[in-house]
Amino acid sequence: MSTPATTQADIRRRHLSLVLHTVAEHGPVSRAFVAAQVGLTRATVSTLVEELITAGLLVEAGPTRAGTVGRPGRALALSDRGPAGLGAEIGVDHLAACVVDLRGSVRARAETEAPNRERTPERVLAEVAELILSVAGQAREEGLVPAAVTVAVPGLVGLDQATVEHAPNLRWNRVPVANMLAKAVESGLGRLPIRIENEANLGALAELWLGGHDGVRDFLHVSAEIGVGAAVVVDGRLFRGARGFAGELGHAPVYPGGPACPCGGQGCLEQYAGEEAVLRAAG
């Protein structure tokens, strides 16, 4: 059973989250507007706001709009400095990394062509680490500090979100990507949380959160480039399945006696709908 202290801490975290999400969705807004939206007193909201400002998550963006009674307050907005997200991508033929601030603006980006199919995981991840450190350095010059790293990969990711279980187009099996990257960037970034995710899953979350599909909470997202990937969103949440591989489409056999696939199967969808297959069919 949780202690009263733990319960109070949980409630406070929830209230901080409510305030932050309200400003993110509606900002710039006044403290009074936030209080009305979240159902807390203005005094409580003011205390929470000060804590979020101190943490670098919110800023006072200027006076509130005219039309209010009394002295104008200060409008609140998400900070464009302080904590930021850092994302990286490992593709079959490229690598990329970027830093995004709390307002969703890309503040630093680096990309390079890379024949990753022909290289070892160690060599690929060493280059990814260089890109991560490069964009983190650019972001630091603008007052941004990465809070965590998410890496997109074209393959099956374990439930631990740290290991690439199988990536046929990279020829990777059981590669502890998160651990290897953590060691490679620790000297420059410290011990940042690093999460690995299937690229189609991240594409589906981007459509859910940023795609402008208001009211759509159930859909199948398909991504097709060199390989074919897919992800399933059910009731506004990513559906992973028992082993974390739900939605995997590219290596579903469509012609069981068809051509051999790098995954070890035959007649997989990628052999007919992947980029290389389409280019071959087009001559």
Image (cartoon, grey):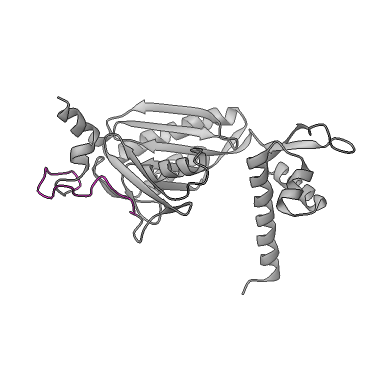
Taking depth in this image into account, of 57 and 123 the one nearest to the observer is 57
| Residue sitting at the far top | 283
Taking depth in this image into account, of 17 and 108 the one nearest to the observer is 17
For image coordinates 33% across by 30% down, the residue present is 94
In this rendering, position of residue 34 left or right of residue 166: right
Find residue 80 and report its horizontal and vertical position in percent: 63, 33
Which secondary structure is most common in the magenta stretch? loop
Query: Exactly how many numbered labels are in the figure?
Result: 0
Stretch of the chain drawn in magenta: 245-263
Residue 198 visible to an observer of this rendering: no
Picture quarter containing residue 152? top left
For image coordinates 82% across by 31% down, the residue present is 66
Picture quarter containing residue 75? top right
In this rendering, position of residue 253 left or right of residue 148: left
Q: Is residue 168 magenta?
A: no
Q: Quadrant of the N terminus?
A: bottom right
Using the image, determine if residue 263 lies above or below residue 76.
below
Residue 279 visible to an observer of this rendering: yes
| Residue sitting at the far left | 257
| Residue sitting at the far right | 70
Find residue 147 and report its horizontal and vertical position in percent: 55, 43
Taking depth in this image into account, of 27 and 43 the one nearest to the observer is 27
For image coordinates 39% across by 51% down, the residue present is 162
